[in-house]
Amino acid sequence: MQEVQKLVRLPSFLGLLSSLVIASLLAGQPAATADNPPRKILTGWIPYYSMKTALPAALNNIDLVDEVMPFWYTLKYDGKIKKAVITDLYAPANPSIPIAQPLAAMRAAGLKIIPTITDGTAKLVLAKMLANPTQRAQVVDAIATMVRVNNYDGVDLDFEGFAFVDGNTTWTSTAPHWVALVKELSAVLRAENKLLSVSTPYVLDPKAAQKGYFVYAWADIAPFIDRLRIMTYDYSVARVGPIGPISWTERTLQYAVTIMPASKVFVGVPGYGRDWVTSVTGVCPANVANTVKAGAKAATFVMRDAAALAATYGATPMYDEKFGEMTFTYQKVYNGNTASGLSTSCTATRTAWYQDARSWALRAALVSKYRIGGITSWTFGMEEPMAMESIRQIAKQVAPDQINVTASTVANVINYAEPFTISATFTKKDKSPLSNVPVRLEARGTNETTWRTLATVTTSQDGSVTRSVILGKSAVVRFVSDPTWERNAGISPEFSITVNRTISIAPPASAKSGSAIQLTGSLRPRTVASEISVERNVAGTWKRIDSASTPDVTDSLGNFTVTIPAQPRGVLTLRVSAVDPLWPLVSTEPFSIIIR
């Protein structure tokens, strides 16, 4: 991926966040209609050197995107402190736009932010660091600290030096140390509820003749990663050919889904093309002689400029069904002077390959075919507008069913130990019932944020569920069905249920005048030191009877004894109340004692 960084010159995007980005968030995006939202199958990179195009491309297609990988960091070895360090590439490239501004825009859009860290070390340096347990632990700590300090949702490792710099003779020895890094970093990130993504070149079934870049040991890292982003491009670099043939792309995908859950797998799609010189006639000017010759390194261009490049030279791009890509050939004349100053001219025949909207749609269709996590764009902002729209149409076709839930309760106020009943009906968008599906009855305390499961029940043939439970305290309750490939989560309306405590007493039917009266009882749920008061009804008004100089309170079992001072003859109408700052006031029904 790093090889294509020079495609886009660094522009300033001062003012962009306050205009284009914010406007897109407030005014709405070119998204699917609200009643038919597409599946969010697209992720992609946002490079530090092309913020002006990459960030708006992500934000303007927020209906397709739920996570992004800012391409902002690289790992280096600091010889002075002899430790691994994470270097920020964003700040030097964008001095007038603090990093907090694009992060705020992404978070306001609801995006998960999983920044990419590249290998910025020299040949074999990172491999040797990972082979040393102490230095490997320092790498883990440096990465985890970067994630923690910036409150990122995780991290994406793009360590391509193993594949393209170190040499394939090192792969067998490097692989186990790479696996150890992934395992150890995963443990730290998962403990903090963070995601671990890795981006690697292709790997193929080890049983086959071609194994791909097996240094990345997909099968061994599979249990420890949350995302695998396969760089299914750069198939043709030194020689003329497609950027990422569809059959080759599908072949590495087929291997990936056999060794890990398909939902972890993302297929890379390139937003760039390559343009090779295939032959030259004449003598080229000195200033281009080294680059305009057969076998020279290919030029690169972004997808959104492909049509203009072809039109400039009168070429007609053709779609290649076999490779699932566009290609065209054209001739370009170069005029100038030789090294000795003589006038000269040459004509180069050039051939370009790139992926367009149709190509991206073909690869987006793999999401449904294999039920993978999605596709990943290198990079946002290179694509032509119709490429995004082609993905949107595919995403609509594979969008999960929307689940509607209606619910009701028998009562919103209940007494402690009294069963509480809630009912719900789960239906799909077309109003057909969601039958035989497990759903959870969840609750959380009125001052809590974490939901806990009270019970699991299965919907009936008509999509309905009914459940009675006993709540220990006031809570908010709801029914929830988990999301699957075919459907979104179903979440019922929330109901606030107030649970009143209960007081049980056994008052005497009568008592002698001139003698104290003892009342015993219990408070449920049991709490210690809840204050118990006795009130007397006097002409329709309740007045407290002081039984002692200190208040009567419950014991550790919730039991209490209250002594009422001697009363004159007559009928004494009373009630008992419990006072506790953590509970609503609760009182017994009025009762009478005949004083003889």
Image: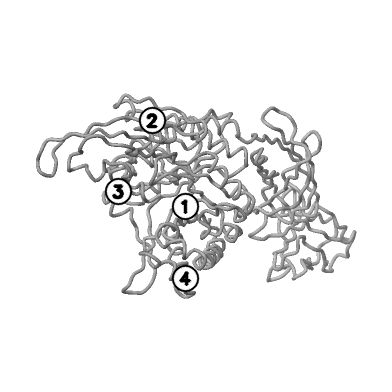
Q: Is residue 284 visible?
A: yes
Q: Which residue is drawn at 69% across and 52% down?
A: 474
Q: Which of marks 3 and 1 is nearer the N terminus?
A: 3
- As helix, strand or loop, the secondary structure at mark 4 comes to helix
The quarter of the picture where residue 435 lies is: top right
* Image quarter in which the C terminus is found: bottom right
Q: Is residue 472 left or right of residue 309?
A: right
Please state which of residues 596 and 392 is positioned toward the viewer in this rendering.
Answer: 392
Residue 97 shows which numbered tag? 3
The amino acid on which the numbered mark 2 sits, given as a three-letter code, is: Phe
Q: Which of marks 1 and 4 is nearer the N terminus?
A: 1
The amino acid on which the numbered mark 3 sits, given as a three-letter code, is: Ile
Could you say where residue 178 lies in the image, as x and y percent from the top left? 51, 64
- As helix, strand or loop, the secondary structure at mark 2 comes to strand
Please state which of residues 257 and 152 is positioned toward the viewer in this rendering.
Answer: 257
Q: How far apart are marks 4 and 2 (CA)?
A: 47 Å
- As helix, strand or loop, the secondary structure at mark 1 comes to loop
Q: How far apart are marks 2 and 3 (CA)?
A: 40 Å
Q: Can residue 110 be seen in this view?
A: no
Q: Is residue 34 left or right of residue 486?
A: left
Q: How far apart are marks 3 and 4 (CA)?
A: 33 Å
Circles 3 and 4: CB atoms closer than 8 Å = no
Q: Which residue is drawn at 12% across and 35% down?
A: 343
The amino acid on which the numbered mark 4 sits, given as a three-letter code, is: Arg
Which residue carries the number 2 mark?
328
Which residue carries the number 1 mark?
114
Which residue carries the number 4 mark?
136
Position of 375 relative to 469 (above/below): above
The quarter of the picture where residue 83 lies is: bottom left
